[in-house]
Amino acid sequence: MPMNPETKERFFRCVKEVLPSTTKTCIWIIKITVAVSFAMMLLKYFQILPWISDAVSPVFRIFGLPGAAALAYVSGYFVNVYSCIAVMTTLELDWRALTILCTMVMCSHSMVLETAVLKKTGASGVRMVIVRTLCSFILGIVLNLILPGSSLQEVAEADAAERLSFWVTLWEWFLSALKLVLMMVAIIYTLNILQRLLREFGVMEKIAKVFRPLMRVFGLPVNTVFLWLVANIIGLGYGAAAMLYELEHGDVSRRDVLLLDTHICISHSNLEDLLLLAACGAVWWIMLLARWAMSIILVWEQRLEFYIKDTVSKK
């Protein structure tokens, strides 16, 4: 059914409005992503990343994980969930170890990129790194204590493939990075345009009504519902442009943003990443509920900070 002239005019006006800011944010995200990806490729090729992993592997016994799991965590921490999966699939981990490891990775993956996104929305970068890292460790310890069984038996890594030449490795990285950039561009532009259209045609208000009860449980302002949905459905990296546009043009205050950042720094990417890790053998509802519980604690602690600050300022 063809659009009437007025609807068509509103549609193209929305697209035109978001293109400049989306392009700017898209370039910023791609620069960070490519730089981190390239750095990790060098660290892997020159065997520096395995050395880092070996250095932290003794700590992983606290989480009930074998030392070999450290490399998967470090890869996810600095790159993304896909990198973690690539390493994790070379290990023989049971459901318990996979659930603990994947919960920790979901809390603290893509640390460089996602910290940059959170910082751009107004959060403290240092605080976000500390909170996400500590929370991943805390959840690892708690899950190790409450989940039945034990995962402490050491596992063997699959035989490493023959080491490729640097130029072959570089070419493979380039193709992988190009594919990722093209996918990011498509998703970022599509999402940002969709976000603007939803607001223009009044769909945002209807979405807010559906999720209002859940926002209250999380301790989040109702006007952050779209940003919360973006972070949960596609994550912080792909959703950065839409989030930044909403912050600039929406009715979200700085405190609202800080509360949201406190929540989504721990609990985001709860669709694709969660399903991918569940497909690897981790228990999806444990990964989800554990991070929801932690994010609720963090948000209400942040609200307590605001309350104390307001009380002191009035005296």
Image: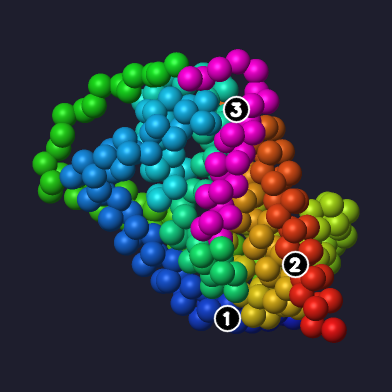
Question: Which residue is at 56% across, 63% downward?
Answer: 127
Q: Which mark is residue 305?
A: 2
In this rendering, the label closer to the viewer, 1 or 3: 3
Relative to 97, 263 lies left or right:
right
The image shows residue 215 at horizontal and vertical percentages of: 81, 56
Label located before the other in sequence (2 or 3): 3
Question: Which residue is at 38% across, 33% downward?
Answer: 57
Question: Which residue is at 76% across, 75% downward?
Answer: 309
For the residues labelled 2 and 1, say whether their Cβ atoms are less than 8 Å apart: no
Viewer-nearest residue: 106 or 191: 106
**Disc 2/disc 1 C-alpha distance (Å):** 40 Å
Q: Dividing the image into 4 quarters, which one contains the C terminus?
A: bottom right
Relative to 138, 313 lies left or right:
right
The magenta stretch is 128-152
Can see residue 78?
Answer: yes
> Which corner quadrant of the image does residue 144 belong to?
top right
For badge 3, the amino acid type reads: Asn
Relative to 72, 128 lies left or right:
right
Viewer-nearest residue: 23 or 284: 284
Residue indicated by mark 1: 16
Label located before the other in sequence (2 or 1): 1
Q: Which mark is residue 144?
A: 3
Question: Which residue is at 60% across, 82% downward?
Answer: 17
**Disc 1/disc 3 C-alpha distance (Å):** 51 Å
How packed is label 2: few (under 14 Cα within 10 Å), some, or many (20 or more)?
few
Compared with 5, 213 (above or below) is above
Can see residue 284?
Answer: no
